[in-house]
Image (tube, rainbow, N blue to C red):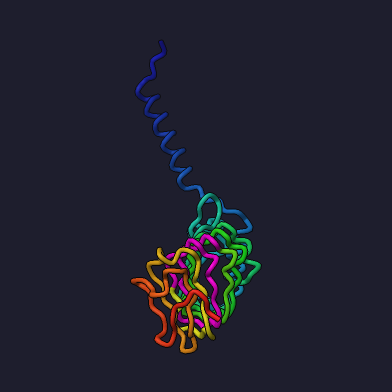
């Protein structure tokens, strides 16, 4: 039987440790199109306050960026002086499950390609419209402090948290998604909001719900 000398064994352990350390230091790979999308967002906003080093290939080191399985899964760019989220950039980030872009100043956003989104926070921007009909996995949608005139979340069957206070809803908002009983928070506010369409059995609202004093709940808003 061949017996390893202590020195040989120690060398092997040190070599293995060094290899593991090198592995830990290896930058996280991310799909090139995802990195390109982030750079496009950065370059589209020349006055942004993002601290990204866009020359780095490891986007997991960029503030507010979380990489999972080589894709950008979380993008948190709130309070970053962003006035443009290019559609051509967002449509590449198809693995996004969370987008936090509150307290910026963009007017429009297209999230139709981001079908894996579960959390979308866009409060305190200048949005006048938003289409979330493709985002059926959404569980949280925060839109307060915009200029939204219309909102339909009836297709968002997983939605449990909706905030839409301080907007400009022209008449009605449809939240009848078949899951109203599980919505632990629902806030809608506008001086011109008159009707909030809800599920049957939700016409009295629930704990945690709040709408403008001039509005009422109904299963059929005109």
Main SS category, magenta section: loop
| Callout count | 0
* Residue 89 percent across, percent down from the top left: 62, 66
Q: Quadrant of the N terminus?
A: top left
Q: Is residue 91 above or below residue 211?
A: above
Identify which residue is drawn at 50% across, 78% down.
104
Identify which residue is drawn at 44% across, 84% down.
215
* Residue 4 percent across, percent down from the top left: 39, 19
Q: Quadrant of the C terminus?
A: bottom right
Q: Is residue 118 left or right of residue 108?
A: left
Identify which residue is drawn at 49% across, 74% down.
219
Q: Name the foreground residue: 110 vs 68.
A: 110
Q: Name the foreground residue: 160 vs 84.
A: 160
Question: What residue range appears in magenta?
Answer: 136-162
Is-magenta flag for residue 185? Answer: no
Is-magenta flag for residue 156? Answer: yes
* Residue 189 percent across, percent down from the top left: 44, 82
The image quarter containing residue 8 is: top left
Q: Judge whether residue 51 can be spotted in this image.
A: no
């Amino acid at each position: 039987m061949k017996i390893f000398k202590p020195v040989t064994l120690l060398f092997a352990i040190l070599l293995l440790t060094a290899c593991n350390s090198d592995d830990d230091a290896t930058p996280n790979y991310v799909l090139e199109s995802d990195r390109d999308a982030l750079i496009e967002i950065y370059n589209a906003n020349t006055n942004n306050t993002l601290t990204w080093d866009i020359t780095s290939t490891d986007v997991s080191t960029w503030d507010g960026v979380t990489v999972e399985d080589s894709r950008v899964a979380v993008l948190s760019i709130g309070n970053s002086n962003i006035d443009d989220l290019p559609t051509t950039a967002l449509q590449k980030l198809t693995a996004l499950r969370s987008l936090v872009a509150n307290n910026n100043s963009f007017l429009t956003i297209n999230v139709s390609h981001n079908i894996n989104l579960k959390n979308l926070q866009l409060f305190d921007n200048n949005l006048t419209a938003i289409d979330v009909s493709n985002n059926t996995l959404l569980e949280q949608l925060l839109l307060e402090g915009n200029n939204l005139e219309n909102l339909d979340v009836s297709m968002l069957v997983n939605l449990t948290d909706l905030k839409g206070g301080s907007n400009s809803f022209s008449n009605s908002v449809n939240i009848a998604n078949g899951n109203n009983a599980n919505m632990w928070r629902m806030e809608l506010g506008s001086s011109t909001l008159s009707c909030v369409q809800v599920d049957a059995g939700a016409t009295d609202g629930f704990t945690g719900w709040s709408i403008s004093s001039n509005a009422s709940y109904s299963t059929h808003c005109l």
